[in-house]
Image (tube, rainbow, N blue to C red):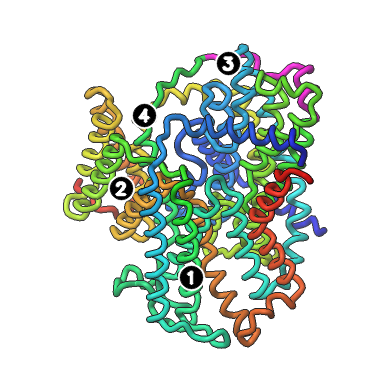
Amino acid sequence: MTDARRESLHDLENAIHQIEDEERTPAGPTTNLVLALAVVALGLAALAGALSLGIGTPERPGSGTWPLLIGIGLVGLGIALALRFRQDSDAEAFTRNSAVVAAGLGTMIVFVAVIETIGFELPSLALMLVWLRFFGHESWRSTAIVSVGAVVAFYLIFVAALAVPIPHLF
Amino acid sequence: MDLAPVIDGFGVVLEPVNLLYCLIGVVIGMLVGVLPGLGPAATIAILLPITFEIEAVSAVIMLAGIFYGAQYGGTITSVLLRLPGEASSVVTVFDGHALARQGRAGTALGIAAIGSFVGGTVSVIALSFLAPLVASFALDFGPPEYTALALLGILLVSTISSGSRLKALIAAGLGLLLAVVGRDAFTGTERFTFGSLDLADGLDFVPIAMGLFGLGEILHNLEQRHRAIHAPTEIHDVWPSRQDLKQSSGAIGRGSVLGFFLGILPGGGAVMASLAAYAVEKRRSQHPERFGQGAVEGVAAPETANNAAATSSFIPLLTLGIPANATMAVIFGALLIQGIRPGPQLVEQNPELFWGVVNSMYIGNVLLLIMSIPLVGLFVRILRVRPAVLAPITVLITLIGAYTVNNSVFDIILVIAFGALGYLMKKAGFDPGPLVLAFVLGALLEESLRRSLLLFDGDPTGFLTRPISGVLFLALVIVAFLPAIRSLLSAREKEPVG
């Protein structure tokens, strides 16, 4: 590859990163290190599981042979990642907005926790309302219209038309 | 080549119900392509539960339509808003948006649609000839060859995917580990089930794909502040002039061939094809300075190549049973759900499915051309739908859809858990694609490895003495060490001579 060609490809890559990564704050070295150690720990857990399953021999591979290989691989990759904890910049830092994600997950956990007792309609309505009004900053009017409309549509599709045995109130 | 099954395949496509699913697929594909946020892999994952209810052929025709349809749709936002709908349309932004600023958005979209049509169609024709050849070659593959092939597939996807190679390999390792959960197929021993009955049969592919791709992307988008979208209301002059066509015909031709070949490579696919095609045109051009300022070839080349690649990436899936990228992994999962194991026998044993799906792509491309030129205004209007409104609706479709697979609340819990994992992976710079791919290949890989070891009496050099697995392992070593070799070479180049 000539220098000119390499340069033009390099420019292309940079330009693409600019389009993709607008407004992104990278996480610090501590996050990187914690991530790498988590990978090592996962690998060690796989190794421990493999040993308790019985790793067998090359002639007679056991239930633990494959997990053993995966575990070794993960530990190795985790260590390699740990060695680069100062250079890596592809992890994003958590921002104030990340709390919205936690809240979003919260609405889903509530949904799954109550669906068997009160059916899917009210939890769906609540989820729509929170997402539209508080995450999406929609007006109350459009929140109400879209939430009710969506839940009615889900009811008609899943319960009335497809007769899916999803727990429902009505 | 026996043409009878090919012609029968057209009979399958032309059944009204299959035409309808093809239309539904490409319309959904266009829509998700236009709407930034959910990609084709996520959309197909979310729609997996629906495919349980329909025939295998119709289901795959629809899912394939979503995949290549998204390549058409992704162009629209790249050109109009400088906001690529799909990763494979990122390069289109440079010249496509420059053209739009000059008031020639219509031309850019028209050329992209024609290029996409030509690229897609050329690729289907080439696929029709090449795929049966590959399949017949692969019929003799035994466990050692499959071990090598699956490993090579995972390694290529991890090394070529965007972002950190190391992290992609870790994601793949995690996918392999998740595939271990459940009863061992050889001994019946429960592995990593922690005594849970729900886990005894292993983790289901559907909640993993729905969670990682679907919810993971929605949660990640939720965190980004949405830029206000100001979509133009009217698009003029979508039919390109003769001058534009003449200028881009070479780019379309080269993009078709390049895209076809890059699409076959595991890990290649549409994104790499669009980049390579753009780079080739810029290098060949006598006026490379025009690129980025609104060169029509700069739109034609990547848009042609990404469609050609999207189509040809079906070859490794349908002939070897090895998905070439994340979206193919999800379609692989859809086939497994239907009780169909993609592989070399598929062409022989299930010709209606194989040729039905392949031939549906001709029809799909014609439908997309119609939607992209005369009807493009309709799709532009969809940009007015706010992401904030779509997100909770998609979340509910995902949660309820996950339930319908086994009528189990445990599956909803899994989707949410994998959604959280998908979000965290994105935050930490891990691409969830290699995880899903490794997960679907995990069982095949372990089984072939263990069978091979039994076959070789525990001697791993047996992999190298069989010609095909030997060559594949050699390729594996080259791919694994390529980055190291490359950095060594460039370090040497930088040293002063003397």
Residue holding disc 4: B225
Q: Which of the two discs, 4 and 3, labels the residue nearer the N terminus?
A: 4
Q: Amino acid at mark 2?
A: Val
Would you identify the image quadrant in which residue B463 lies? bottom right
Callout 2 crowding tier (Cα within 10 Å): few <14, some 14–19, many ≥20: some
Q: Which residue corresponds to the image point at 72% horizontal and 21% vertical from the top-left?
A: B289
In the image, farthest residue toward the left: A117
Distance from disc 3 to disc 2, alpha carbons, whole Å, reads 41 Å
Question: Are discs 4 and 3 both within one chain?
Answer: yes
Distance from disc 2 to disc 4, alpha carbons, whole Å, reads 35 Å
Q: Amino acid at mark 1?
A: Ile
Decide which of B173, A34 is in the foreground and name it.
A34
Q: Amino acid at mark 4?
A: Arg
Decide which of B213, A145 is in the foreground and name it.
B213
Magenta region includes residue B389? no
Magenta stretch: give its range. B234-250
Judged by depth in the image, the label closer to the viewer, 2 or 1, is: 1
Residue holding disc 3: B235
Residue holding disc 2: A159
Residue B16: percent from the left, percent from the top?
A: 59, 44
Q: Which mark is residue A104?
A: none
Locate residue A10 relative to residue A26 in the image: left or right: right
Q: Which mark is residue A72?
A: 1
Distance from disc 4 to disc 1, alpha carbons, whole Å, reads 40 Å
Q: Amino acid at mark 3?
A: Ile
Q: Which residue corresponds to the image point at 61% horizontal and 50% vertical from the top-left?
A: B160
Kind of element beneath mark 4: loop
